[in-house]
């Protein structure tokens, strides 16, 4: 794991600041840590930030939503890792944060050990999610139903769908398609690297290329694209 040099924490709760500061200094002892308790304070500290590597952002800030911070960080430091650290576990905040470019989503009531593991994982290119959030996303995919197949459409629609999938596939190399398929099946970075027969760093590089080519910012979005492309299928519950 290559540790970050510059870390930003945007959090207004003193208790959460202590938890985050302890976890961050323990996990990345050589990093420079900048704290901001509001959106206004974040903006005032932006000029003093260098090449930001990691931002940990609360969504419920006293002067607005942390989504604004995510937008700003992604615009100014596109390569930075963004970890949401919040009490909000609703679909609206979750999917909005991922859409804006968050790389992970952790809930404040997760144990400290999970926070430390998430910090390590996110810098390894392994987007972390709280178990509750991961389950919520899986349910969301299940509710989406099966991926439409060509036989479900008119001939013209089927031709267009096949052409769209062909364009998607052609953008990815065979190695990247294999990586995307394994990722969508739930393999984490260590298992992904082992299955591909490469180092974690190389596997993380494959993921970054896939994210860039597909225009996604998270494992969840990549999984959605894999389902849409027909690389994997979401199993539907049978009841009972």
Image: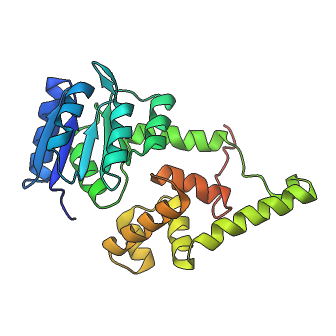
Q: Quadrant of residue 168?
A: bottom right
Q: Nearer the viewer, residue 163 or 218?
A: 163
User: In the rendered image, is residue 106 in sight?
Assistant: no
Task: Give the residue at x 37% y 32%.
Answer: 68
Q: Residue 69's x, y, as percent?
A: 32, 35
Q: Measured along the vertical axis of the image, is residue 168 above or below residue 130?
A: below
Q: Is residue 201 left or right of residue 226?
A: left
Judge whether residue 41 can be spotted in this image. Answer: yes
**In the rendered view, would you say 198 is above or below 29?**
below
Say whether residue 75 is left or right of residue 2: right
Residue 240 vs residue 218: left or right?
Answer: right
Residue occupying image coordinates x 26% and y 40%? 56
Q: Which residue in the rendered view is the most extreme toward the bottom?
A: 197
Q: Which of the 4 image quarters holds residue 196?
A: bottom left
As displayed, is residue 26 above or below residue 139?
below
Query: Seen from this angle, which residue lies furthest top?
Result: 62
Q: Residue at x 64, y 52 (%)?
A: 234
Q: Position of residue 178 (x, y in %)?
A: 54, 73
Q: Residue at x 56, y 66 (%)?
A: 181
Q: Where does the C terminus fall, quadrant-wise?
A: top right
Q: Position of residue 221 (x, y in %)?
A: 52, 50
Residue farthest toward the left in the current orientation of the protein: 30
- Frontmost residue, 203 versus 69: 69
Q: Quarter of the image containing the N terminus?
A: bottom left
């Amino acid at each position: 794991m290559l540790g970050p040099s510059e870390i930003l924490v945007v959090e207004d709760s003193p208790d959460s600041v202590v938890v985050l500061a302890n976890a961050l200094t323990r996990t990345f002892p050589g990093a420079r840590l900048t704290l901001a308790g509001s959106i206004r304070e974040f903006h005032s500290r932006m000029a003093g930030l260098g090449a930001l590597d990691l931002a940990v952002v609360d969504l419920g800030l006293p002067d607005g939503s942390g989504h604004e911070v995510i937008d700003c960080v992604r615009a100014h430091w596109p390569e930075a890792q963004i970890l949401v650290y919040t009490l909000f576990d609703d679909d609206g905040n979750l999917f909005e944060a991922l859409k804006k470019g968050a790389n992970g989503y952790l809930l404040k009531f997760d144990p400290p050990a999970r926070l430390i593991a998430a910090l390590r994982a996110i810098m390894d290119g392994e987007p972390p999610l709280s178990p509750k959030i991961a389950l919520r996303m899986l349910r969301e995919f299940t509710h989406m139903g099966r991926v439409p197949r060509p036989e479900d459409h008119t001939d013209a629609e089927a031709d267009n769908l096949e052409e769209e999938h062909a364009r998607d596939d052609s953008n990815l190399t065979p190695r990247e398609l294999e990586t995307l398929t394994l990722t969508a099946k739930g393999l984490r970075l260590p298992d992904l690297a082992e299955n591909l027969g490469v180092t974690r760093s190389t596997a993380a590089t494959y993921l970054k290329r896939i994210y860039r080519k597909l225009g996604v910012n998270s494992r969840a979005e990549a999984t959605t694209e894999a389902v849409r492309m027909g690389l994997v299928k979401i199993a539907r519950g049978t009841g009972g």
